[in-house]
């Protein structure tokens, strides 16, 4: 894997566990498997795992709960590459499931974005609906790591558009 996205990071402890899990000793506690590490017979753990492997893995965490907001500064100050907001889970934890226009959600989202900019980490968002206007707005806000919709939403939206004979 060149990158890992860890869901439901709610605390400093969660992010530290994620960092430990993707790094080999002495930094972390990731296990060393066979095959590649042994050069398919020639053991090269130090070169392939410790010196090279950990450098290639990007770590992104998902902010999906109000709990994460309490430790946000500490979470973003760790050795992570970026974050992604899980909008449905975050709004659900706020008691406003799916209400992405709710002022409370917009304030939380803005606060997360501003905090991430201070730590110069990639700022991510999952845009659920296939809406290019929303995509452009998120880019203008400063997001630079965007998951754009999902296949079943794209199919549903396109299938419901009026048929044009032109």
Image: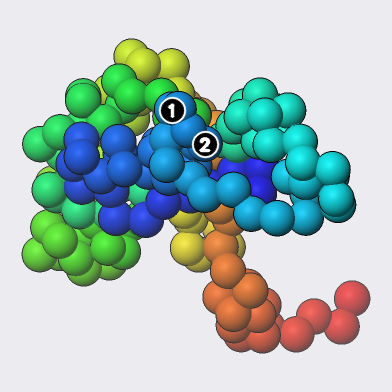
Q: Taking 103 as reference, is 112 left or right?
A: right
Q: Which mark is residue 27?
A: 1
Asked whether residue 83 is in view, the answer is: no
Q: Which mark is residue 12?
A: none
Residue 71 location, x and y as percent?
15, 33
Q: Which of the 4 quarters of the picture holds residue 162?
A: bottom right
Estimate the spatial distance between the alpha carbons at disc 1 and disc 2, rounded to whole Å: 6 Å
Q: Which of the 4 quarters of the picture holds residue 108?
A: top left
Q: Taking 104 as reference, is 23 left or right?
A: right
Q: Which of the 4 quarters of the picture holds residue 64?
A: bottom left
Q: Taking 123 as reference, is 35 left or right?
A: right
Circle 1 packing at 10 Å, graded few (<14), some (14-19), many (20+), is few
How many circles with numbers are drawn on the protein?
2
Residue located at (37% from left, 48% from top): 62
Residue 106 location, x and y as percent?
23, 43
Residue 75 location, x and y as percent?
26, 31
Q: Residue furthest front?
A: 42
Residue 59 location, x and y as percent?
49, 38
Callout 1: SS: loop
Asked whether residue 109 is in view, the answer is: yes
Q: Are marks 1 and 2 in contact (CB under 8 Å)?
A: yes
Residue located at (37% from left, 43% from top): 18
Q: What colouring does the structure picture have? A: rainbow
Residue located at (75% from left, 85% from top): 163
Callout 2: SS: loop
Residue located at (73% from left, 45% from top): 37
Q: Locate the C terminus by quadrant.
A: bottom right
Q: Nearer the viewer, residue 36 or 160?
A: 36
Q: Nearer the viewer, residue 8 or 135?
A: 8
Circle 2 packing at 10 Å, graded few (<14), some (14-19), many (20+), is many
Whether residue 125 is situated above or below residue 52 in the rendered picture:
below
Q: Which residue is mark 2?
A: 24
């Amino acid at each position: 894997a060149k990158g890992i996205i860890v869901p439901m990071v709610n605390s400093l402890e969660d992010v530290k566990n994620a960092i430990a899990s993707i790094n080999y000793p002495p930094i972390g506690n990731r296990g060393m498997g066979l095959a590649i590490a042994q050069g398919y017979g020639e053991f090269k753990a130090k070169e392939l795992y410790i010196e090279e492997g950990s450098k290639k893995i990007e770590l992104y965490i998902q902010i999906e709960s109000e709990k994460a907001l309490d430790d946000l500064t500490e979470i973003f100050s760790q050795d992570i590459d970026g974050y992604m907001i899980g909008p449905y889970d975050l709004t659900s934890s706020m008691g406003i499931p799916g209400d992405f226009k709710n002022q409370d959600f917009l304030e939380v989202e803005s606060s997360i974005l501003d905090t991430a900019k201070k730590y110069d980490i990639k700022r991510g968002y999952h845009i659920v609906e296939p809406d290019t206007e929303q995509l452009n707005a998120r880019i203008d806000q400063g997001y630079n790591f965007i998951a754009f919709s999902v296949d079943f939403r794209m199919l549903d939206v396109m299938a419901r558009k009026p048929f044009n004979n032109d």
